[in-house]
Image (cartoon, rainbow, N blue to C red):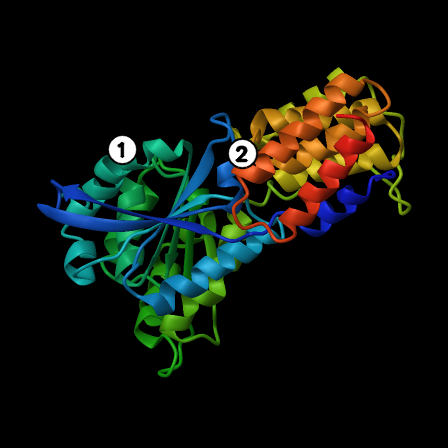
Amino acid sequence: MKNINFLILFIISSITYGQEIDTISFYSKAFNEERTVYIHKPEFYKYKSESVKLPVIYLLDGQHEWFVNPLLSDIQYLQYTHEIPNAIVVVIPHKNRNKECGIVDLTTELPLDAFITKELDKALLKYNPSDIKVIIGHSFSASFSLYSYYNHPDYYNFVIANTPLDEMELLVNSFQENNEIEKGNISISIGGIANSKDYHHRKKYNELKEKYPAFFNSINVFEANYSAHNAVPIVSTPTLITRIFESFNNRYSNIAKVNDEYKLISVPETPEKEVEKIILASKIGTSFYPPEIAEINGIASRYWNSEFDDLTIEVYKLGIEYYPNYYEFYLSLYELTYNKDKVQSRKYLEKAEFLLKTVESSLKGKSKIIEEIKTEKIKNGW
């Protein structure tokens, strides 16, 4: 950062990771009644363009705050620490979890299954979701999650089943015999064998693990040996969901590498080629997922700190393609273009001012930033 005071302010007031929650209620043909779900959107949702499609995480047992709230906190913290991508988290409450999640057989369609994969899927289209979908359940809903993944391996990318028991041998045997389903996308956790922990579920798990070694060797398991049944999802989910998105954290690690002084270790290529590298690396698995705001800032700062201003400008221009309502990118572009193109620089500054007044309703320090912008405009005769 060069010499403009308000840029220091906007770094301090950088984006927070609060969640915005939408409540959606609609009539479900599958259940023959109205159902309600809760949509947790990341803070940067309001900044993004239509080209930013977010993964979807279905979180069952939404009627249990003791289950849902810790997992929502885990997900939010892992997003904040950049272990997993931001996502649309869909919390689904049950009215009668045993009845809704209880498996008859693997061919009988359960109303909950139709509700998620058909009705709710359509309701989520307005949130512009990506094709990356994860379903997470616990106990009864964990077995249901496995059942739903078994029947829709092309709909879900991953399933996390925390300490399942219902119809587990049917599920395990069916998965093992089905060569069309990717077993590596299945994660199962289990608690301790002690009577005070997760005895009945662990006992069955141990039996099945011995009987079906091929299946358990092909999936991801988390054995929470010191955890009770209801504690298992809280303990295991952070590890299992981080493993699912293992490639996300370092997808830009080969771009703009720096040394201990935060200087580039090699001369970068042209701005066009460097941006192309960023776009090519913007994937989760085989699915395109553009850089998040923090990633744009991180890459840009590495170029900027080594005084490759033209490269930095192109990275921030890429940023406003994906997040056109994010005022900070425009402030950075204002400073970067100030000595190159005063007309364009003014446009960036005024766009930042407009977004602060229209998009940012509760930004801490907002009034100070607007005052600094006014001071800049007066200084430049604008």
Classed neighbour count for the residue bearing mark 2: other residues with Cα under 10 Å, few (<14), some (14–19), many (≥20): few
Q: Are marks 2 and 1 in contact (CB under 8 Å)?
A: no
| Earlier sequence position, callout 2 versus callout 1 | 1
Locate the C terminus and report the quarter of the image it occupies. top right
In the image, which is nearer the foreground, mark 2 or mark 1? Answer: 1
Residue 206 visible in the shown view: no
Q: Residues within 10 Å of mark 1 (few under 14, many from 20)?
A: few
Q: Is residue 117 above or below residue 81?
A: above
Q: Amino acid at mark 1?
A: Lys
Mark 1 falls on what kind of element?
helix
Q: Residue at x 87, y 39 (%)?
A: 3
Identify the amino acid type marked 2.
Gly
Q: Position of residue 1 (x, y in %)?
A: 83, 40
Q: Label 2 belongs to which residue?
A: 285
Nearest to the observer: residue 355 or residue 268:
355
Give residue 204's position: percent from left, percent from top.
Answer: 31, 67
Q: Name the foreground residue: 363 vs 322.
A: 363
Asked if residue 125 lies left or right of residue 309, the reply is: left
Q: Is residue 89 left or right of residue 360?
A: left
Q: Is residue 83 something one can see in this rendering?
A: yes
* Vertical relation: 276 (above or below) 295: above
Instruction: Please give the residue where the numbered disc 1 appears in the rendered image.
Output: 122
Give the percent coordinates (x, y) of residue 310: 82, 22
Closest to the observer, 74 or 41: 41
Nearest the eye: 343 or 181: 343
